[in-house]
Amino acid sequence: MTPGLWELVLRGVWVTLQLLFLGALVATVVSFAVGVARTHRRWIVRFVAGLYTEVFRGTSALIMIFWVYFVLPLAFGWQLVPLWAGVLALGLTYGAYGAEIVRGALNSVDPAQREGGIALSFTPWQRMRLILLPQAVPEMIPPFANLVVELLKGTALVSVIGMGDLAFSGSLVRLALQESVEIYTYLLVIYFVIAFLLTRAMRALERRLKAGLGRAPAKAAVAPVRVPEGAGAGGGA
């Protein structure tokens, strides 16, 4: 490819990374807000949070992008630029999946830990902040890593509203070169490299968080060698 076409691809990578970072930020906020709400003691809070989760998990991310970009301006008069429309749609959609991760991790904490916080007269917020979240967050990292990779792949959907992300830029380069094999192979490699780096970063974060809780994998201990009785020095008579 010519330098100009490579520049177009690199601009697409930059837009994809912006979508990934901002979408993950929105999804994280939504995940914790809705996930914690799903464990709330009031049924109405759990019901609203559960309704949100079911609605956004049961709708297509592609249609959600169309809805935010085309329908939201007609309904409320808010016209979002394509970047923010994509970020909002992806963040809300993948945040619904993340909320289930948060809910499951919080419910997996030993009930005795909750009871200990109650015995210490901690408020619900103190129990959540000081007891539950520090133990639950490390367990959230592996499924969150998978969710971030899915979000990365989902960023390609914004090309349908004309955003110059990696997928859209790749399509323009394909039209310019009239060559599909080369450009789409490059796109596969670029997506794979970004996903690989993300998973490695999330694994490092998981190890660090678990080490802070004293749950990092311990090095294998060397078993002591048992010397048979009567096999001391000069064992031969």
Image: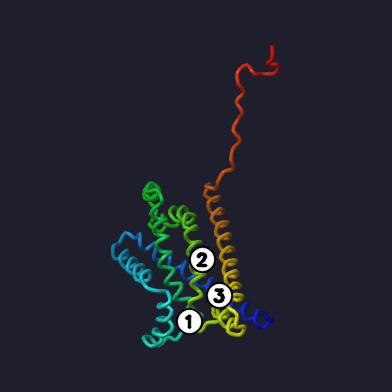
What's the residue at 58%, 84% (across, down)? 175
What's the residue at 51%, 84% (across, down)? 162
Which tag, 3 or 2, sits closer to the chain's start? 3
Which is more toward the observer, 120 or 1?
Answer: 1
**Amino acid type indicated by mark 1:** Val
Task: Tell me which corner region of the image, top left, top right, bottom left or bottom right, holds residue 166.
Answer: bottom right
Q: Residues within 10 Å of mark 2 (few under 14, many from 20)?
A: some
In the displayed structure, 146 sits above or below 90; it is above
Residue 70 lies, in percent from the top left, at 41, 85
Relative to 74, 83 lies left or right = right
Look at mark 2 in the image and give the residue it sits on.
149
Look at mark 1 in the image and give the residue it sits on.
160
Q: Give the color scheme: rainbow, by chain, secondary structure or one colour.
A: rainbow
Q: Secondary structure at mark 1?
A: helix
Which tag, 1 or 3, sits closer to the chain's start? 3
Which is more toward the observer, 232 or 1?
Answer: 1
Residue 148 lies, in percent from the top left, at 50, 66
In the displayed structure, 36 sits above or below 9; it is above
Residue 181 lies, in percent from the top left, at 59, 75
Relative to 210, 73 lies left or right = left
For residue 16, the mark is: 3
**Amino acid type indicated by mark 2:** Val
Q: CA distance from mark 1 to mark 3?
A: 14 Å
Residue 54 lies, in percent from the top left, at 34, 68
Q: CA distance from mark 3 to mark 2?
A: 12 Å
Q: Residue furthest top?
A: 237
Which tag, 1 or 2, sits closer to the chain's start? 2
